[in-house]
Image (cartoon, helix red, strand yellow):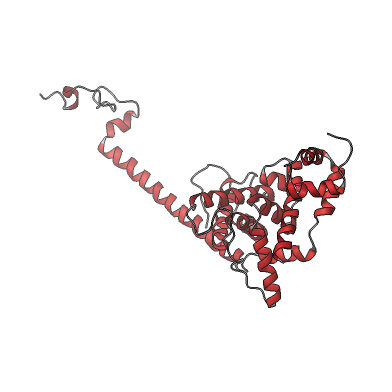
Amino acid sequence: MSLANHDEDRVLPSEEELRDVVDRHAAAVYRVALSVVRDPSLADDVVQETMLTAWRRSPVAAGKEIPRAWLLKVARNSAISLLRTRREDLHGPDTLPEAPGGIETPRTVEGRAQLAELWEAMRHLDEDARALIILKEVDGLSYEEIAATLELPLPTVKTRLFRARKALKNALKEWR
Amino acid sequence: MIHRHPSRKQLQLWLDIGASRRSTRRTERHVAECEHCHDALEELTELDEAIIADLQLATAPPDDLTARTQVGVDDRLRNEAAIGSFLDLFTIGWDVARTVLDPADEAIGGPATDGDIPHDGSGSADEIDGGTR
């Protein structure tokens, strides 16, 4: 089925291209969203919204690869918007859920406790610090990509990441 | 920028308390522009592999995320396409109705003529009721 876009009169990525973007980037988009919204089901919503935005407003011509940094920037902005509209949600503005929901991994009791401690430590970081750690340590973005994603100067990204890592280490010392 | 690099102890202090003291403000200014210190800080703040592995687990998406996203995105695009088609039909219907009800206006296709009711409502009562008073 051909899907028309009624907003703009331009060539849009094909459905196959969109599927490819979802296959390749949904997990990274989810993690960035989770660092902001702190709720797995809201992070899910952000993933869908981001993919729709990618289809509607891709910054590159159809057939070309959508830059990962652009996609993650859209994800973060969508997550922030979503959070703003849900100020009355159950979680405070700087808290994460009690435990990382939706994750069912066959781990030992000890392993699960360790994961909970890490999650607790992440709760104590601010949103920028969480995003920086996830983008760099989990998604493996370069500093340049992170700078583009967070719209920050490169030196700022580096110095904030160093301090975020240190803050996480300190928080882990407290919780472990 | 100061040319003498901060010691590891000074870097550690800056990492811990940020630019809240005069000395750490100096460190921060230096660090912002010094690649050499970036390397030192990379080393000082490097996370254990075990922590990174746990981070990956703690932020892992559900197994069916990709499949659910594909379905959700497809549904929303189809719904939007359906709404778009409905609006197109409505617009066509509206244009047809206008042509049937007011063929002269459609034929002229221009601005209101003397016989039309002005859109801004500024016409006199005579003009509006066709001068039958």
**Front-most of residues B10 and A124:** B10
Residues A128 and A23: in front is A128
Residue B66 picture location, percent across and down: 61, 64
Is B52 positioned to the left or the right of B8 in the image? left
Front position in the image: B127 or B35? B35
Is B8 located above or below residue A175 in the figure?
above
> Foreground: B72 or A168?
A168
**Above/below status of B113 relative to A56:** above
In the figure, is residue B124 to the left or right of A25? left
Residue A129 screen position, x and y as percent: 68, 51
Q: Residue at x 36, y 47 (%)?
A: B90
Residue A15 position in % (x across, y down): 58, 56
Q: Quadrant of the N terminus of chain B?
A: top right
Residue at 26% from the left image edge and 35% from the top image edge: B102
Q: In this view, does B66 lie to the left or right of B119?
A: right
Q: Quadrant of residue A92?
A: bottom right
